[in-house]
Image: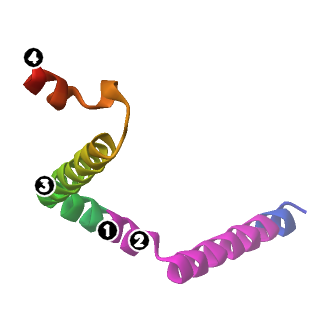
Amino acid sequence: MFQESLELYIRRLLDFLLYTKNYIIRTNPIKAMSASIVEGIKDFLTIKKKLKMAQYRLNYHQHQLQKMEQLIAENSDHNFLKGSNLDQKR
């Protein structure tokens, strides 16, 4: 009885280890973890370049917005939008 239960436990343990080995071979978590670490290091090293690109895009869009606002103010009949014309008349 004891020997049979011991054999059963050992067989279950070996099956578990076999399933675990096959899972590790199939998913390869160490390779995925190393790829993730490498990707994180690349992001960390290129963060300054990405920041400069984001600042350039922000400045470009701010400039475009200022140009649009200026065109709207020049073509509008409202006096409160034409602050520069009022300052020149004073």
Residue 7, quarter of picture = bottom right
The mark closer to the camera, 1 or 3, is 3
Give x and y (percent) for residue 24.
52, 75
The residue carrying mark 1 is 34
The amino acid type, in three-letter code, at marker 4 is Arg
Position of 80 with respect to 9 (left or right) is: left
Residue in view at x 27 percent, y 59 percent:
40
Q: Residues within 10 Å of mark 2 (few under 14, many from 20)?
A: few
The amino acid type, in three-letter code, at marker 1 is Ser
Residue toward you, 21 or 1:
21
- What number is the disc on residue 54? none
The image shows residue 4, relative to residue 41, as above or below, that is below
The amino acid type, in three-letter code, at marker 2 is Ala
The residue carrying mark 2 is 32
Q: Residues within 10 Å of mark 1 (few under 14, many from 20)?
A: few
Label 1, label 3: how far apart the Cα atoms are: 28 Å
Residue in view at x 30 percent, y 40 percent:
73
Q: Which residues are magenta?
A: 7-36
Contact (CB < 8 A) between labels 1 and 2? Answer: yes
Q: What element does badge 3 sit on?
A: helix
The image shows residue 8, relative to residue 61, as above or below, that is below
The residue carrying mark 4 is 90
- What number is the disc on residue 52? 3
Q: Is residue 8 magenta?
A: yes
Name the image colouring.
rainbow
Residue 37, quarter of picture = bottom left
The amino acid type, in three-letter code, at marker 3 is Lys
Give x and y (percent) for residue 78.
37, 31
